[in-house]
Amino acid sequence: MNIIELNNITKTFGSVVAVKDLSLTVPKGSIYGFIGPNGSGKTTTIRMIMKIFYPDSGEIKIHGNHRNGIVTDNIGYLPEDRGLYKKMKVNDILMFMGELGGGSDLRTKIRYWLNKLDLATFSEKKVETLSKGMTQKLQFIATIINEPEIIILDEPFSGLDPVNAEILKDVILDLQKKGSTIIFSTHDMGMAEKMCDNIFMIYKGEKVLDGTLYEIQDRYGADTLVVQTEKGESALTGIRGISKINNYGKLQELKLEDRADPQKILAEIMKNTAIKKFEITRPSLNDIFIRIAAPDRKEVNHA
C-alpha cells in the first residue's frame, strides 16, 4: 500500500523549473531516501508534500486523498533550515510544539525523549544556550513528539557527531518498526545505502533514479573494481580498460570500460605493484551519484 503518491507534479519559480513532471510512490512503513545535488529539487518536493508550496500541475495524495485545504494529516516535518524559539526553555518549546499538534500525555513523552537523546540535564535551559548538535536533537524531538504516522526529515544527520548520528539512526529505525513511514533527504550516501528501503534521486528537477539499492545498482552492472596496492593510484594510471579512477587514498575504485576484462586489468596492475586487495563489485551509491551529478558526467539515465 502506498501512503504518498506524487503524480506528474511540476513546480516553477519564474523561469526556473524546480521540479518537472515528477511521479513517485512511497510505500507505507518504508524508509524512503531522497538524494540529489544541492538545488536539484529535493526540498521543493518535500515542501510540496507538506503544502508549503503547491505544484503548478499534477497531484499529490496522502492515503489516497488529495492535498487540498487545511493540513490535517499526521505528519512530522524536520526542515533543513532549523528554527526554534531561542529564548524559550527546552521543556517549554517541546510542550508548545506538542500542544500545537494536539498531543496528549506530553510531559511523559518529553521526559522519555529528553532522556533518550541525552538532553534531560538541559530541560530548563534556553534553546539559545544549546550547541548545534543539541539543537538538532531538540528539533528532532519536536518533530516526532506526537508520534506521527509520516515523518519527513530534511538532512536529519547534519551537524551531528558520529555518536549522536548513530543514536538518531537507531531512533529512526525504531520509529519505522512501530509503523511510521519515513522520508529523509540526505547527502550521506553511506547512510542512504544502509538504511533506505527505496532510494529516489532527483537531478535538475527530474527523477533519474528510483528503486531499491539492488535495483539501482543492477542498472549499472558489476563494472567496478576496488583495489588496494602498495603504490596506490600511481600504479593504475595508463592501464587500458579503466575509464575512471576514484582515489580514496588507501583504496582506489576503478570504473571499467564496456567489455573490459577484469582479469587482464589485474594482470596489468600486478606488473606495476603488489596487490593487497582486488574486488569486482557493483558501483556504490556514492559512485552512481557522482556519475550522474559530476560536472564531467556522461551518464544520466532517467528512471
Image (spheres, rainbow, N blue to C red):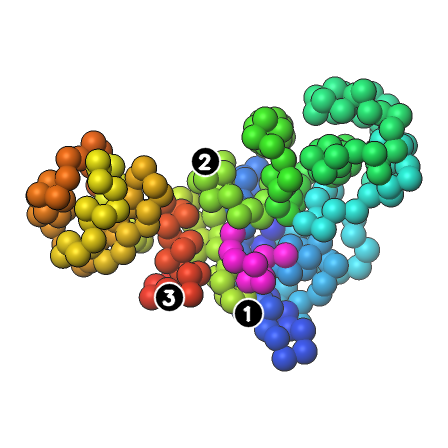
Q: Is residue 38 magenta?
A: yes
Q: Is residue 207 left or right of residue 80?
A: left
Is disc 3 placed on a helix, strand or loop?
loop
Could you classify mark 2 by the number of other residues whose Cα lies within 10 Å: few (under 14), some (14-19), or many (20 or more)?
few
Q: Name the residue that disc number 2 marks.
A: 194
Under mark 1, the amino acid is Lys
Q: Name the residue that disc number 1 marks.
A: 20
Residue interval drawn in magenta: 35-43
Is disc 2 placed on a helix, strand or loop?
helix
Q: Is residue 290 left or right of residue 154?
A: left
Q: Where in the figure is residue 127, as x and y percent of width and height? A: 84, 36
Which residue: 62% across, 42% down?
158
Q: Is residue 118 left or right of residue 110?
A: left
Give the spatial CA distance, label 1 vs label 3: 23 Å
Q: Earlier in the sequence, mark 2 or mark 3?
A: 2
Q: Name the residue that disc number 3 marks.
A: 296
Name the mark nearer the viewer: 1 or 3: 3
Q: Name the one closer to the observer, 29 or 153.
A: 153
Which residue: 32% across, 37% down?
250
Under mark 2, the amino acid is Lys
Q: Given contact means CB atoms under 8 Å apart, are the residues at marks 1 and 2 in contact?
A: no
Which residue: 44% across, 61% down?
293
Under mark 3, the amino acid is Asp
Could you classify mark 1 by the number of other residues whose Cα lies within 10 Å: few (under 14), some (14-19), or many (20 or more)?
many
Give the spatial CA distance, label 1 vs label 2: 29 Å
